[in-house]
Image: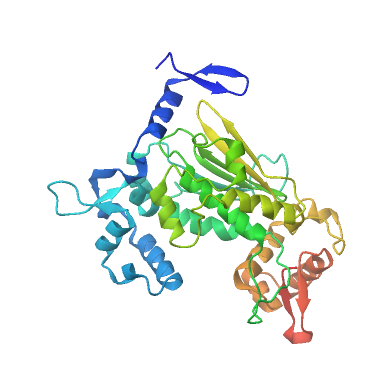
Amino acid sequence: MTGTYRRGGEGDYRCSPESYQAMVRDASASPLDTLLLDKVTTDAISPDTLASYRNMLSSLRPNHPWNELPDEDFLIKLGAAGLSTGSTEPRLTRAGLLMFGYEHEIVREFPSFFLDYREVYEEGAVRWSDRIVSSSGDWSGNVFEFWLKVSNRLTADLRKPFVLDSKQLRVDSTPMHDAVREGLVNTLIHADYLGRRPIVIQKYRDRVEFSNPGDMRVPVDVALQGGISDARNPTLMKMFSLLAASERAGSGLDAIQRACRQAQAEAPIISVSYDPDCTKLVVPFGAASAFAESPSAMSPSTLKTPSGERQRVLRYIETHGPSKRIEIQEALEVGSTKAKRLLTAMVSEGLLRTEGASNQRVYLLP
C-alpha cells in the first residue's frame, strides 16, 4: 500500500492508503452499487420515497411493464434488491439503499455519506442563504429525495424566454435548465459513496459548483469530448435514466458545454483533487442567470445581494408558473402594499415581466 504511486500532471505521487483503497474499488470487475447487502432488508426503505419514484415512473412511462408489479418485485427488477442464497426475503443492494433508504440506515453501510446543498448569493459570505442536508432528520435523507428537492432549486434563478411549442404551450426548460439538472445527476451517479468527502452542491448567482467524492474514471479531456460514459454507480444511473433524468450515452458533459456557449458563459470546468479524492464541476450561468446584466435589465445595487424575498418570488413562479400578485402575496405572507412594491421593483430590474392588465395581470419569469 505504501509503495503505490499515482501519475499526475507534473509527476508521480505516492498514494495514501485511502487513495489506494479507492483505486482498488474502481478496478473491481463488479460495480460496487450492485453488491447485495445480506443484512439489509426492504424495511430500510422509505415507503414515501419508493411511492414517489413509482408515481413518477408511471407518469412518464404509463405502459412500462414494471408499473403493475408489487413493490418487492419492482425493486428486484430495478436492481435495488435481490434474493441472497438461502433467503426467501429480498435484501437491498447498495444502490437500492442509497436511492430509497433512510439516512440512518445508509450511514451504517456508508459511514461518510452526506448530501449537502447550499445557496450562496453573496461572494465570500461565511454563511449560506438556504441549505438542505441529508442528516437534518426532517426528511428521508436518501439520494432520490435529495434529487427531487434540489432539482427545482437549482433552476429557480435561470431565465425562461417566452417560447411556445407546436401545441402553443410554453416551453418551461432551456438548455441551461437541462445542463444543471444533468450536472446534479452526474454528481450523484459518479460519487464514490465509500469515500471520505461529502457530496456538496453550491449555487451562486452566476454559477453552480458540483463536488462529489471520487476521482474521474475517464480522463477529463475525454469526458469533455462526450460519447464515453463510465458511471461509478451504473445501477443508480439506470434508476435515473428510467425517469429520463440521465444521459446514458456519455453526452451529458457535451450538453453542458453547449448550454454554456448558448448562454454566452465561460466553459464549464472540471477539476480533480486527491487525498481524499474529489471531483468538482463548475457550470457558469452566463446570460441564463436571472441576475445577469442584460440590455433590458437595470443594474440596481439590490441585484448585487439579492434579498431573500426576491429569491422566494422567483422560486414560487418557477414552481407555479404565471402568478397573480395576490397569490405571491399570500405565499410570502406579506401585505398588499409591500407585495406591490416588491413586484414593481423586480419588474423594473428585469427579474420579472407581466402580462395582462388590471386584475388579470400575472407575473412571469423573463
Q: Residue 86 vs residue 294: left or right? A: left
Could you tell me if residue 315 is visible in this image? yes
**Residue 195 found in image quarter:** top left
Q: Residue 281 vs residue 290: left or right? A: left
**Residue 302 found in image quarter:** bottom right
Residue toward you, 219 or 135: 219
Colouring of the image: rainbow
Residue toward you, 283 or 63: 63
Up/down of 243 relative to 260, above or below: below
Q: How many marks?
A: 0
The structure residue drawn at horizontal position 78% and vertical position 85%, both measured from the top left corner, is 358
Q: Residue 352 vs residue 222: left or right? A: right
Up/down of 11 relative to 191, above or below: above
The residue lying furthest to the left in this view is 86
Q: Residue 342 vs residue 57: left or right? A: right
Up/down of 258 relative to 7, above or below: below
Question: x, y (%) of residue 211?
Answer: 56, 41
**Residue 308 found in image quarter:** bottom right
Question: x, y (%) of residue 225?
Answer: 61, 44
